Image (cartoon, rainbow, N blue to C red):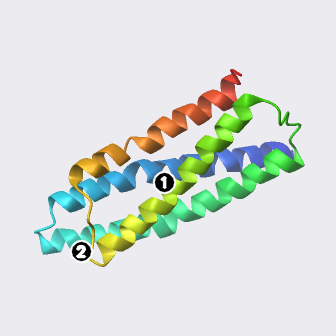
Amino acid sequence: MDFYLLTKAVHIIAVISWMAGMLYLPRLFVYHVQLRDNNDAVETFKVMERRLLTAIMTPAFVVAFLSGLLLLFYFGNVDWGSFWLWCKLLSLFIMIYVHVFLGQCQRAFASDSNRHSEKFFRIINEVPAVLMIVIVVMIVMRPF
């Protein structure tokens, strides 16, 4: 089996899994804020948010990151002077920051200390989608 293609497939699967969580977790936060007075719902959301973050998002991120490093440094014939690559990497680092921030939000919800509004999480919900679009365009089209 071609190790490069296997690594690429693993990377794509991991990125899809990570992005699914990145797009869903802020939506759970919106619902959590909306139902903050319903104790049963709040406890259910706490479990869902923790499991999504710890069982899906973070492992998928680790696999995506490691396989991405492998693709970049082991197989990569990368032109470090290309603007598209730096734009993609900047978008990736912002995505990682959003992941860490969502983890902080999950811990705040778990301890009943969330300070953000429903509207805030509705806006945050759009950030991973925009970053994903930028990253995919940079990788596929390499416009710069």
Q: Would you say residue 67 is visible in this rendering?
A: yes
Name of the residue lying farthest toward the left: 37
Q: Give the alpha-carbon distance from disc 1 to disc 2, as whole Å.
A: 24 Å
Q: Amino acid at mark 1?
A: Val
Lateral position of residue 111 relative to residue 73, left or right: left
Residue 71 picture location, percent across and down: 80, 46
Instruction: State left or right for residue 78 relative to residue 20.
Output: right
Does residue 15 lie above or below 49 as drawn? above
**Could you tell me which residue is drawn at 68 percent across and 48 percent down?**
11
Residue identified by numbered label 2: 43
How would you rate the neighbour count of disc 2 (Cα within 10 Å): few for under 14, some for 14-19, many for 20 or more? Answer: some
Q: Is residue 19 above or below residue 99?
A: above
Tell me the quadrant of the picture where the C terminus can be found: top right
| Left or right, residue 41 beside residue 64 | left
| Marked residue nearer the N-terminal end (1 or 2) | 2
Residue at image x 71%, y 24%? 142
Determine which residue is flagged by label 1. 98
The front one of 96 and 47 is 96
SS label for mark 1: helix
Front residue (pair 37, 8): 37
The secondary element bearing badge 2 is classed as: helix
Give percent across and percent down for residue 124: 37, 48
